[in-house]
Every structure is written in structure tokens, then in C-alpha cells.
Amino acid sequence: MSKRAITLTVNGTDHPVQVGVTERLIDVLRDHLDQKSAKEGCSTGDCGICAVIVDGKLVNSCLMLAAQCDGRRVTTLEGLLEDPIMKRMQGSFIANNAAQCGFCTPAMLMASWDLVRHSAQPTDEEIKVAISGILCRCTGYYQIIDSVREGCKRGGR
Amino acid sequence: MSEQVSQLLNSLRAKAERGELLYIGENVVRVDSLEKVLGSPVYTADLLPKGTVYAKLFHSSVPHGVVKRMELGAARSHPGVLGVLTSTDIPGLNESSAVLLDRQLFADPVVRSTGDILGAVVAETSPAAADATARIKVEYEKLPTIFDPLEALEPDAVKIHQKGNVARQMKIRKGNVEEGFAKSDVIIEKTYRTQFQDAVPLEPEVGLAIPEDGGVRVIGSMQSPHNTQAAVAKVLKLSPEKVRVIQAVTGGAFGPKSDETPYDVCSTAALAAVKFRRPVYCAMDREDSMVMHTKRHPFVISHKTGVRRDGTLLADESKIIGDTGAYASLGVFVIARATFHTVGAYEVPNVKADSYLVYTNNTYTGSLRGFGGPQAIFAFESQMEELARKLQMDPLEFRLRNMLVPGKKSATSAVMDASCGLPQCVEKVVGSSRYREKAARYRNQTGTVRRGLGIALLMHGNSLGPEGNDYGAVHIEVHSDGSVSVGSGLTEYGTGAISGVMQVASSVLGVPLTRFKLERPDTSKHRESGPTVASRVVVIGGNASKLAAEKLKGKIVPLAAEMLRIDAKDVAIADGIAFDRTHTSRKVEWDEVVAEAFRRGISLKEEGFFIAPPAPWDQEVGQGTPYVQYTWGALVVEVEVDSETGFYKVLGAHAAYDVGKAVNPGGVLGQIYGGTVQGLGYAMMEELLHKDGFVVNPNLGDYYIPTSMDIPAEFKAFIVEVPGPLGPFGAKIIAEPPIVLPGPAVRNAVLNATGVSVDDLPVTSEKVLMGMRQETAAHPH
């Protein structure tokens, strides 16, 4: 497999990496850069649990080639662990029992964080739309929606 | 200390002083929440050591046949490939079966479904393994096929297994149905059908094996590590002690991960690990999983039901046929649970049921949340609605007249005791949904957009049923720093059940859950506790946990008494402080008591073992007490149907479940919400389609499960607590039951809105539209 040298800016740090031309962003994040929060659930972009943020946009990391991300900024949950909005959201997820098996939780948190950046006090409908690209099979979504609503309220911005 | 905390402490101490329950019934933080919101690397795929290689399974491309030749050369010489494993590489038994031993790990030479695994390619990278499997060519001699379970029951049908096509037969004989029908004013005979459902745990089946010490260490996503250990050991021809199985944090399970699929990935990984002396990761991707793992059985259920004009049920005769696909797996118990629940939550004096678990050449089916309940209850609750309409009775009043209450008898003649909380559940949902008012308002609608209510009632037997010893062991260890770890062969896979088990210990010991740590289930450390199925963890494991904690308390209390110089009977412990309940200012920290125990060499490790009491049962006539207690429930849904397109949505859901005692109410609500939404998927959209034995839609683009946009805008969930005799503090099970009722409730709501009876799940808009067109054709205006 032919390789290509690229630079990924992941959570603020530049990583020069050699990637195969068919390697996906999720592979490079998980296998080369030890960012395990993005999960693989379908490999076809349907479940959304591999969500990360690339240049400010929430994307499915199983649908992007790593080579496409050369020179771009990638944010994963690992990079937001000290972020005040994310911490509030995590606390709210815990308090509202929003993580059952936890496999979709990182992606749900990324989508929620992304939502709050754009809309500080989202309606329930906005919350549903924001997480609609991510499947959860355990919760039925209600306690996730409660968490996002409360996670936004706490402290405000 | 903040005021809030001191208030909490005071209330805890007051409770402890009075000898009341601590922590139970409080919304506690699950022990495993933090690692999940941090995105910590705790799942199997996150734990691959350096140098791990990848095993990719390949499967049959005919639904029934004999493998004549496998051309493996191209795959073997594919770059990066270490080798190809087939049945000839198995040193032990080529078996991957839970119950009937009818299924091989690598099918040889007969394949009975397109999901039959033939072998695996092992390669340095996952893409190399996948590419190599595409280069394998297999020649088959095709055999005649059967995809319809009714056809498989024909006397001259092709035999899929040597012993015939009926994997299991069950029956119920209660009273005399002929007499019941003779006295009936109205008799309805109808047939209902249900579909294949895929569980879709977001993490598919995966296993990692690492060679070590003349054996192998297996880490995987599973419900039952000890069963997996036995399965792997058999394949590898190793003593079970040489196979150490550890359950990694598991990304959803819902049943298939208690079935045979975890054996497949773990045995394959272990075989390859031993052969190539490398860590091996065997993962199913989504398509593999949807083709090769077990699904929910499609059922064909016929009911003949007789009722007196006043609405009293008199007799029911049912024939229940479950399509188990090519292999039985846990289906032998699924068909049993379906049979015992054949007339649902109602008293019927005369019941006759005959059920058959039937082999076909479809991909196999097995354990899935609800375990036969969703199919049985769909059929009977649909039948109840049809009867009510025929009698021109309100469906609710008809149900109230016949439902099980204390003193009444189930289909198996089990007498309901005082722990039957069904009436309370019904009251909650009827009130919350304003059922009576709305049902009256929605009668005789004529507009384009029509609304309807559907109600369904639940009984769900707790524990494994009459055929399994229901036991579990829980091990508790207090460490020198006062922290407490809990371990068990029973597993956590998302529901929070193990947190509940720990909450029980926390309550008994008076030490908050924040001091507790969960040990990963590990066959080298924890006692075999049976399979983690049937939502039994809080009930069975909770009792074991209580016993272990009580033993520990028996050591801690005398020591604390000695340190406080008081009588042991005056010692209370709350929030990690032991104190004199007569002089609460006299106290000693839990940690100090533990430190003293360590100084004196007192062991603070205990194990609790609990086994459910046996119940009288006659298998010949299906009569007796199959379950020690029941979970009860009721669901009302409201739908709005566009009569021009058939499109409908569920506007509201009102659910109440009698869980005996909610150990962690937030967790119980999570099960009600999650199970109901999974059940709404089953009711409205989910169907794993088979065509000539091939799965047509094995991906999440073509197999729809509910998203956040599909859930009812209004959802009211209620916890009812009528203590049961089996669980700790009266707890009953809750993880499975909420998936059962949405099927019939949605179906009945659509019927009440449109007059259209959809008798085969899922209730799609297309079926509703077709039904309305037929209605219009039959009764033109």
C-alpha cells in the first residue's frame, strides 16, 4: 500500500504521520495516535459513534481518509477533557444516567459540545437534531437529551 | 463541609440509627460512569497490545449445501497474510454450541445457512485480512432449502439436521379448552407473525486472545465469560484453567452476546493466537455481525380464543412456531418463555398451547432482550384487541376484567401472590394518558389525520425459568485503605445492573458507592455464576452481594464495637462512619476499623452465593410455577395516522413497571426509556430481511433503528413498587421487560385510529396504507 506523509493537528499538537492512502481518519487516530475515544460501530457512516471535529465541523471519522485531513485541525474527546463546557456536559451525563454501555457516549458528548458552541440555550428539538446522526441503542435518548439541556444551563456562558 | 453534604450525612445517620435502608432507592452515580464520559480506553478494541494481528471470519455463500472444495491458495499468498484457519486447524472439538451441540465453529462439510462460518484469515492488518477473505473460493454441492418454518414442519420436508426439523417442542395443558369453547359466545381465530430483529449492540462481537503460559488469555465483549471459557477450551483441547477469559467493558449486548457468537470470535482468536504465537484480534464488523450472530426469532402464532358475552375469557388454544434458523442456540429456552407467556397477563381458565422450535435454512436466531416475550405478548395482546372489538367492549375494560391480580392463576396455573402489581401499573398509565377521555374522543373519526390509543399489559417471569439453576456468586474484598472491590462472574454490559449489585453491598455495609470499585469479571478470579441473561443480575447477584456484605459486616461490627467500647448491637454504620446509635457523637471511621482489622490479620474477603429456590414444575403438561416472581407493566401509546399516506407517528408513551424495589431509580428509568424505544423500533421499523436465506439489509443504512428524531415527544415513565419474594429488598427485574409492549401497543393504537389490523410486525406505514385501501375497497362510501 502506498504511503503518504501528512501532518495532522490533533488536539492542538502537530503530528507528522505516514499514512496509507486508503487509511481512514479513525484508523490513524486510534492506531497511530492512541486517541481511542472515537469508536467504530458500522464503518459506513450510519451510526456516528466515530464522531470527531475537523476544522470546526462534526464529522464521521470512518468516512474521511486520513490524507484528506493533511494540515487540518482535528479535535477528539481526549482534547476536550479540560474544556469547561465539556466538563459541565460530562458531569451532566453522569448525573442524568446518560451513559449505559458507553459506546456512543464520546460521540454524543462531541455532538453536544459542538451544539453548545453554536447555541448556548438549545431547545429540545435542536438537541434532538444535533445528536440525530449518532445512534444509541441503550438509552432511548431521553436521558441524553436531559443531560444536554442541563449541561447547557449549568453556569451558562 | 458544605451544608448540603452535612444534611445528607445527618439523614443517612438518622436512617442508620433507625436501622432503615441506606442508598437503596436513591439515584446514585454508577461506578462505571466516569470512564465512559472520559472516553477511556476500556473496550476490547482499545486494548490491543503491540504486534496484534487480525482474524477475519468468512462464511458460507449458500444457504444449504456440502462444501466440496475450498480454494485457499490466493488468500494464503495475499500480502500480510499469516494463514487461513479452517476446521482442520482445530485441535479439539469443532463445536460452538450453547445447548444442543448442533453447531460447529467452522462448518464442515455441511453448511445450513449463509451465516455458517467456514474459517478465518489471519493477517498483519485488518484490511489485509478482509481483502484476503475476498480471494477465497468455495465450491458447494447445493442441497434443497427451506426458509419457511411451516414448510419445515411438513412430514416430507428436507431434514436440516439428522434428528429432524423440530429442535424443541413444548406444551401447556390447563383445564379443558373444548369445554371452554363450548361455553363461549364469541370465538376468534387469528394468526400473527413477527420478524427477525437484530439487537444492534453498537459494539459488534469482538475477541482478543493473547498466548500465555501454555494457554491463552482471552479478552472480549460478552455477557458470560465462564461459558466462553468452556467453549474456547473445548475447541483448543485445553483444560479450562489454561483459558483465562476476561470480560472487557462491553458496548451493548442485548442477548446475542450471551449466545454463541462470542464463542465464535473468542475461539477463533484463541486458535490463531496459539497457532501463530501472536496476540490475535477477531472482530466482526457490522455486516459480519448482522449475518453471523443470533437474531430475534420470527414467530408464527395462531390463537383460537373463546370469551363469554360479558367479556370473560374462557379458553385459549395456541400454536406457537419459532424459526430458529439453522441452529437452536438459546432458542430452546426462548420457545419455553414464549409458551409460558402465551396468554400474557390474563387469567384464562382453559389453556392449550403447543409450541415448536423449528430449523430452517435462515441465519440462526437466539437470545435477544425479552427472550420470546415480545412475540408471545404481541400475538395475545393483538388477539385481546380483536376480541374487545368483536364484543364491542372498551379494550381497557375488557382487559381490566381479565387481567391477573393476586389470587388469579396464570396459564401454567401458578397462583399470583400479593406481589402482583399489575393493577397499580394500569392505573398509572390510564391516568397519565387520560385514556378514557381520549378513547371516547377518538371514536368515529373521519378526517384525514386520525389518532388512536393502544394499550398492552405485561407479565414477565423473573429468573431463568424451570429449566435452569438460577445462581450467582459475588466476591467482596475490603482493601487496607478502606476501599471495597466487588467481583463476580455475572457481568455488566450497559444496564447498570452490577452497580446495583454493589449498591446492595454499599447499603449493607454503610459505605458509599464512591468507595467501591468493580473488578473486571475474570474466570481466573471469579466463580462461575451461570450465564448473565434474563436480567437476573440485580435479583440473583444482589442477593449474593447481600450475603457477602453481611458476612463482612459480621466482622466489622464487633471490631467497631470493641474500638468504641460499646455493645455490638448498638453499632450502626453510615457513610463510612461507625457510630453508637445511642450516642451518635461516639464514632470511629470505617477506614480506622478496616486498618485495625488488617493489623489483627482479620481477612476482609468474603463471597456470597445465592441460588433461587426450586419451584414445582411438570414439564409434561407445562403446569406449575415456572418463575418465582414476575415483573408487571402497562403501556399506553398514542399515535397519529395520516390516512392518505399511512404515515404515522407515536405522539406519546405512558409506561409503568412494577419493579418491586427500584434499587437505583435513575437506572430503572433508563431501562424503561431504552427498552421502550428499542421496542418501538421492533414495532415500527426494524426487520432484518432474508431472501432465499441471504440477509438483504445487513447494515445500518438499510436496517433502521430509532434515532433521536424517532422518539415520542411525550414519554411518561412510572416506577411501581410492590415488593417481590425473590430479589434483595423486594427487587424485581427490569432490563428486558420494557421491550415487550410497544409492538402490540402500537399495533392496537393504529387499529383504533384506522380500523386496520396489522397482524405481522413491524407495523410499517405501507401496511397501514394497504390496509386502509382494502377497507375502502370492501366498504366503499
Image (tube, coloured by chain):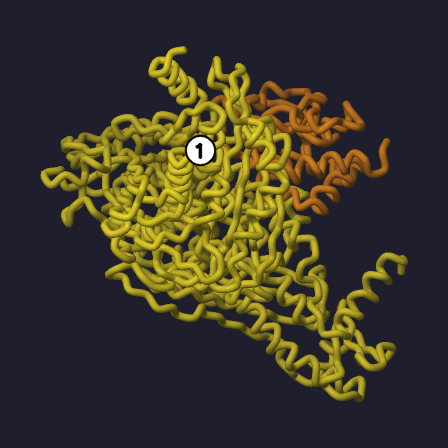
Left or right, residue B605 beside residue A42: right
The image quarter in which residue A102 lies: top right
Figure quadrant of the C terminus of chain B: top left
Total numbered labels: 1
Q: Which residue is mark 1?
A: B286
Chain ID, mark 1 = B
Q: Is residue B119 visible?
A: no
Q: Residue at x 50, y 39 (%)?
A: B455
Give the answer, above or below, for where B594 lies relative to B301.
below
Left or right, residue B714 beside residue B148: right
The image quarter in which residue B92 lies: bottom left
Chain coloured yellow in this rendering: B
- Residue type indicated by callout 1: Arg
The image quarter in which residue A13 lies: top right
Figure quadrant of the N terminus of chain B: bottom right
Q: Nearer the viewer, residue B576 or B262?
A: B576
Image x and y of residue B228, in percent = 39, 55
Image x and y of residue B115, in percent = 30, 36
Image x and y of residue B395, in percent = 47, 38
Left or right, residue A63 beside residue B150: right
Crowding around mark 1 (Cα neighbors within 10 Å: few <14, some 14 to 19, many 20+) is: many
Q: Nearer the viewer, residue B657 or B243?
A: B657
Q: Colour of chain A?
A: orange
Q: Residue at x 74, y 38 (%)?
A: A89
Which element carries disc 1, helix, strand or loop?
helix
Q: Nearer the viewer, residue B340 or B410?
A: B410
Image x and y of residue B468, in percent = 36, 62
Q: Nearer the viewer, residue B474 or B179?
A: B179
Residue at the outermost left position: B156
Q: Residue at x 67, y 59 (%)?
A: B25
Give the answer, above or below, for where B568 lies relative to B193.
below
